[in-house]
Amino acid sequence: MSDEKEIQDMPLETEVEDKGSEQITDDLTSEQSDPTESKEDMNYSQDSNNLEKMILSTGIRVGTPVKTKYMTPFIVRANPEGLYILDISKTLSRIDVAAKFIGRATISRVAVTSAREYGKTPVEKFCEFTGASGIFGRFMPGTFTNPSLPRYMEPEIVIVTDPQADQQAVMEATRAGVPVIAISNSDNVTSKVDLVIPANNRGRKALATVYWLLAREVLKKQGTIKSDSDMKVSIEDFETKLVEELP
């Protein structure tokens, strides 16, 4: 499968925070308030602005010091620390496209996996709220290609947290002709990915944010919730907890 073929319209395991925000143009521009809008509209606009600022503070758009030719179209600049900054507007638009694509599938046949430790809780929560099927622990070779295995699956869509760390799942999905959606950082090779969601896929808060946003959009497409404000769980609920944070 070529990079984003067919659905094109629709790249150190450490937590990276979005530093130097004052030096980076805010890609999530908010609309000017209409003086005639109601108090409820103004409150919703304020909530949206607060959410946008909070999303950016998670480091969702902070990439690595390396970029690949596949991810260059999603990069806007390098920050003073030498890290490539991903285009947040493209991140959000790809999340919306991914949700539409997922919404047309049988949700129980959407397989989601993460070899990265910080991606496991976000995947669990995404599956819990949407009904997708999570693959936890080590991805067993043959999961998508060997019918004799007890955990053999025939997914309609495969979502991976990192196309490099989850390369076995990507490879098997490709062999089986199953579309792959991948959260991809600036240094990822996405030649076998059908739909790239450009985002920081190493940070704990960033991964929670991506899966929370994707879950919210999928729930809207499913009709489970009608608006953004109906999403009652927070991004923090999707975060992998550090040892010292556990009760």
Image (spheres, rainbow, N blue to C red):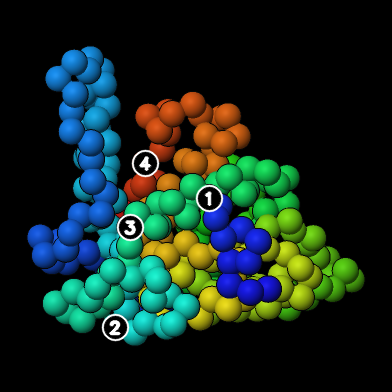
Asked if the residue at tag 4 contacts the one at tag 3, i.e. Cβ–Cβ closer than 8 Å, the answer is no
Q: Position of residue 75 (x, y in %)?
A: 33, 71
On residue 88, which mark appears?
3
Give the quarter of the figure containing the N terminus.
Answer: bottom right
Judging by the rendered image, the residue that carries numbered circle 1 is 97
How far is mark 2 from mark 4, CA to CA?
30 Å
- Amino acid type, callout 1: Val
- The answer, for residue 219, to whether it is visible in the render is yes
Mark 2 element type: loop
Farthest-out residue, left: 22
Q: CA distance from mark 2 to mark 3?
A: 18 Å
How far apart in space, not on screen, are marks 1 and 3 (Cα)?
A: 14 Å
Q: Determine which quarter of the picture holds residue 43.
A: top left
User: Mark 3, residues whose alpha carbon is within 10 Å: few (<14), some, or many (≥20)?
Assistant: many
Q: Nearer the viewer, mark 2 or mark 4?
A: 2
Residue 232 lies, with reference to residue 82, above or below; the image says above
Amino acid type, mark 2 = Pro
User: Which dot, 1 or 4, sits closer to the camera?
Assistant: 1
Q: Earlier in the sequence, mark 2 or mark 1?
A: 2
Q: In the rendered image, which residue does mark 4 sit on?
A: 234
Query: Which circle marks residue 25 in the picture?
Result: none
> Residue at image x 62%, y 49%?
101
Instruction: Say which residue appears at 43% left-offset and 29% top-offset.
Output: 227
- Which image quadrant is residue 106 in? top right
Q: Nearer the viewer, residue 225 or 1?
A: 1
- Label 3 or label 4, whichever lies nearer to me, is 3
Q: Residue 164 location, x and y as percent?
A: 53, 79
